[in-house]
Image (cartoon, helix red, strand yellow):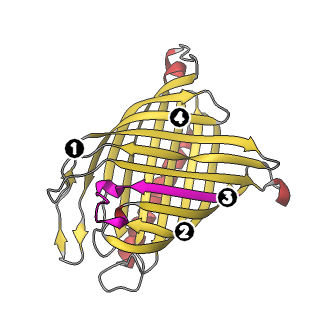
Amino acid sequence: MQKKFMNNTILAAYATFALLGAGAAQAVDWSDTALSYRYGTHFAEPFNPADIKKNILNLSHVNGYAYGKNFISADLLLSDKTDPESVGSDDGARELYVLYRHTLDLGKVTGKDFKMGAMRGLGLTAGFDFNVKHDAGYNSRKRMFVAGPTLNLDVPGFLDISLLALWESNAPYNGFSKTSTPRYDYDVHPMLNLVWGIPFNAGVPLSFEGYANFIGSKGKDEFGGGTKPETNIDMQVMYDMSAAVGAAKNTFKVGIEYQFWKNKFGNSDRGNPGATARTPMVRAEYHF
């Protein structure tokens, strides 16, 4: 099982770096690549009443070019044994989650100025998510495509608001019953997505960063049960400690992070406390 997971991880890593290389091959105006680590002890998973400890490693890259921007993120999530890798295992679950978004700037493409009031610009966003997780109960194989309009608001740093349609499917495997479920397509459903990074100074250089996803119900799940709307808010306050170690601005950041995720994956949290997570974390980043 671990070998299979590592093979999937290596393949996804190659795909990630291929996308990074494709971005670099464009006439890139600016870019930022980051390695980060975060840790928390109160993660939650549906139908698991235990608090879960997770170490999360991330590689992300964002760049801007003449007609828009690209963003890719790959998380490697390592659980402790309260979220076991398989039935009866003392090893924790392992998950790889990859996300890609491309936003086409309509102002740059058309030559028109969409700036109006608080709106800095207007774009069209499309992309995908996929994951591979090895755990006892579900073994997610999520595949999702997204598309919709994006508003860029005129704030210090950035604040982007997107209204996206989601085409999501999964093909889980239950380790308890040893049952595979054929790939199942949920109903197309909406997501209101906010992404922000706003610098401020409180005597030291700080930034308020994060995202918020408000996701509509995706209809019946693959087992015939109803799904619930989700709220997933992940935010952090980061301190730029670069000057303290003699590095360029925004090279090294440390901070605290908090995630609130209600009705995780569309599972109702009524009688199912693991379906809502309230997770404080510590976070460190290296940008290059």
Q: Earlier in the sequence, mark 2 or mark 1?
A: 2
Q: Which residue is mark 2?
A: 40
Q: Are marks 3 and 2 in contact (CB under 8 Å)?
A: no
The quarter of the picture where residue 178 lies is bottom left
The quarter of the picture where residue 247 lies is bottom right
Residue 288 showing in the rendered view: no
Between the C-alphas of marks 1 and 4, the distance is 26 Å
Q: Earlier in the sequence, mark 1 or mark 4?
A: 4
| Residue in the picture at 78% in, 56% down | 241
Q: What element does badge 3 sit on?
A: strand
Q: Earlier in the sequence, mark 4 or mark 2?
A: 2
Residue 67 location (% of width, % of height)? 53, 27
Q: Type of residue at label 3?
A: Gly
Which of labels 3 and 1 is toward the front?
Answer: 3
The residue range painted magenta reads 254-274
Label 1 crowd bin: few (<14), some (14–19), many (20+), radius 10 Å: some
Label 2 crowd bin: few (<14), some (14–19), many (20+), radius 10 Å: some
| Residue in the picture at 46% in, 30% down | 150
Check the image and name the residue furthest to the left: 224
Q: Which residue is mark 4?
A: 160
Q: Earlier in the sequence, mark 3 or mark 2?
A: 2
Image quarter hosting the N terminus: bottom left
Check the image and name the residue furthest to the top: 112
Q: Type of residue at label 1?
A: Asp
Q: Which residue is mark 3?
A: 255
Q: What element does badge 1 sit on?
A: loop
Q: In this image, 147 relative to 153: left or right?
A: left
Nearer to the camera, 212 or 38: 212
